[in-house]
Amino acid sequence: MAIGKNACNCSSPPLTLSLFDFRRGLGLAIYFSRHARRQMKWRGVSEAEVLSVLDAPDRMEQSIDERSNAYKLVGDRLLKVTYVDEERDVVVITVIEKEHVGG
């Protein structure tokens, strides 16, 4: 099943980052699915926090359907961002706050 930007039911225009280097270079468009936006709102996670996870994750893992999970400790919260890395775009599928153990 295609997850692409046209199939993701994205609720907002892409966030195009002119200075954001996400492994490939400048000008990468970041799309947030409606589900991701809803989860971000419910959990009080900003776009800037999601971008910091994508830019410099503490840990990465492969998920299902060519999705990737990026984890990062942001402040005192462990955030998990699930996304699809496409040819010139990234589609954020969901954002979750995981339980942080340690300190």
Image (tube, rainbow, N blue to C red):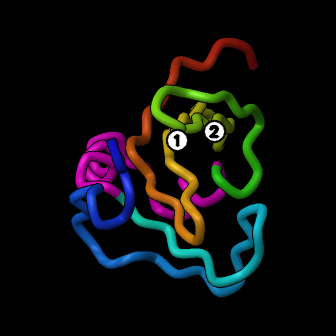
Q: Secondary structure at mark 1?
A: strand
Nearest the eye: 92 or 48? 92
Q: Which residue is labeled 1 in the image?
A: 81
Which kind of residue does numbered mark 1 sit on? Val
Stretch in magenta: 33-53
Nearest the eye: 25 or 43? 25
Residue 49 visible (yes or no) = no
Tell me where residue 63 appears, x and y as whole percent: 54, 27
Q: Secondary structure at mark 2?
A: strand
Q: Residue 14 occupies which quadrant of the picture?
A: bottom left
Residue 39 is labelled as: none
Tell me where residue 57 appears, x and y as whole percent: 73, 43
Q: Which residue is labeled 2 in the image?
A: 70
Q: Residue 58 occupies which quadrant of the picture?
A: top right
Tell me where residue 23 appears, x and y as whole percent: 78, 62
How many numbered marks are there? 2
Residue at x 65% of width, y 87% of height? 18
Is residue 48 shown in magenta?
yes
Q: Is residue 24 above or below residue 71?
A: below
Tell me where residue 24 appears, x and y as whole percent: 76, 68
Residue at x 41% of width, y 65% of height? 31
Q: Please report whichever mark, 1 or 2, sits nearer to the chain's N-terminal start.
A: 2
